[in-house]
Amino acid sequence: MARLFSEFISDWIQGQLNEIDRDYKMKLNDMPRILWFDMEISPLKAYVWQLGKQVVRHSQLDKDFNQWGIICITYCWNDGKPAQCIDWGYEEQDTAKVVREFDEIIKQADHVIGKNNMRFDNKMLNAARMLNGLPGIPDWVRYTDDLERQMRKYFRLPSQSLDYISEQMGLGGKIKMEFQDWIDIVEKNGNGRKSFNKMIKYGKKDVEDTRTLWNKLSEHFEPKFNSATFYDKSLACINCASSNLKKNGTRVSGGIKYQTYICNDCARYAGRVSINREDRLK
């Protein structure tokens, strides 16, 4: 009898654990898919008459190194898992392959975040698509956000470099790379493979730091992505979509009065809603 009871309890506990695991997976699948990414490109090669500040024209570029190639793109999701990498192949140096594979990753994302990507990575990807005859994705930049742009908007720091911010926030800074590493990779010199492997680790550390910094610091700024609209909720936190909000005063902007909120669950600024003349939420 005792054995049957023990087996019953064991089966019941296992059933509860399976249900919790199933609920967790369902919740995870229901979450917006947020993608962080970073890329490393090859340098251009030009012929010059002297050193120092000067104008280098396109006619001075080496014919074999006259446009940028994408060495690798590292990326990670909002699932806590380690970063992954798509590279051009040490021998092949195939930029089109990198872009094709990463475009399939982009299509799975609800929101894409980088570091200085608005000025650099987004445009580099678009240029690589154009120059390699690949299909365009003109709308993808509308659902991208930029850690550097948010940092510059909301913080005054001695430096906005990822190396500095990572160091200050206790993440150890960037893995050290030298310009010679880029040269060895593109020209396949003796240390090229070693530099290539180091660059992949370098890129993964960068993108994981970007994810960590975003999650730590986004409470201080207002992201472009609104979780409340993702879950189609009329009054919910823009960060986590929780409806457990508390009022945080009113503001007037452009002649419109707004009620602002703080989220009780994630303790972040939750957004604002306009108030009509009868002081009722629209």
Image: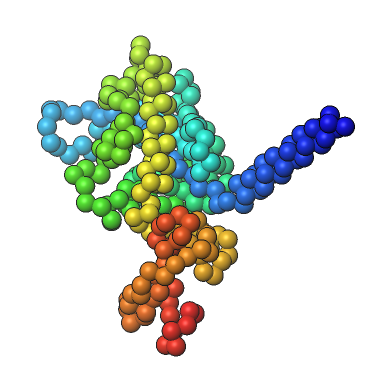
Q: Is residue 84 left or right of residue 190?
A: right
Instruction: Please tell me in which quadrant of the rendered image residue 52 appears.
Output: top left
Question: Is residue 163 among what the camera can see?
Answer: no
Q: How is this picture coloured? A: rainbow
Residue 182 horizontal/vertical position (percent): 33, 25
Farthest right residue in view: 1
Q: What residue is drawn where x is 21% and y is 37%?
A: 56
Front-lying residue, 232 or 52 = 232
Residue 221 horizontal/vertical position (percent): 35, 56
Location of residue 235 with respect to 278 vertically, above or below: above
Residue 71 horizontal/vertical position (percent): 42, 30
Q: Is residue 216 left or right of residue 53?
A: right
Farthest top residue in view: 190
Location of residue 77 with respect to 189 vertically, above or below: below
Location of residue 270 with respect to 204 vertically, above or below: below
Question: Is residue 14 among what the camera can see?
Answer: yes
Q: Is residue 126 left or right of residue 100?
A: left
Residue 41 horizontal/vertical position (percent): 37, 33
Q: What residue is drawn where x is 67% and y is 41%?
A: 21
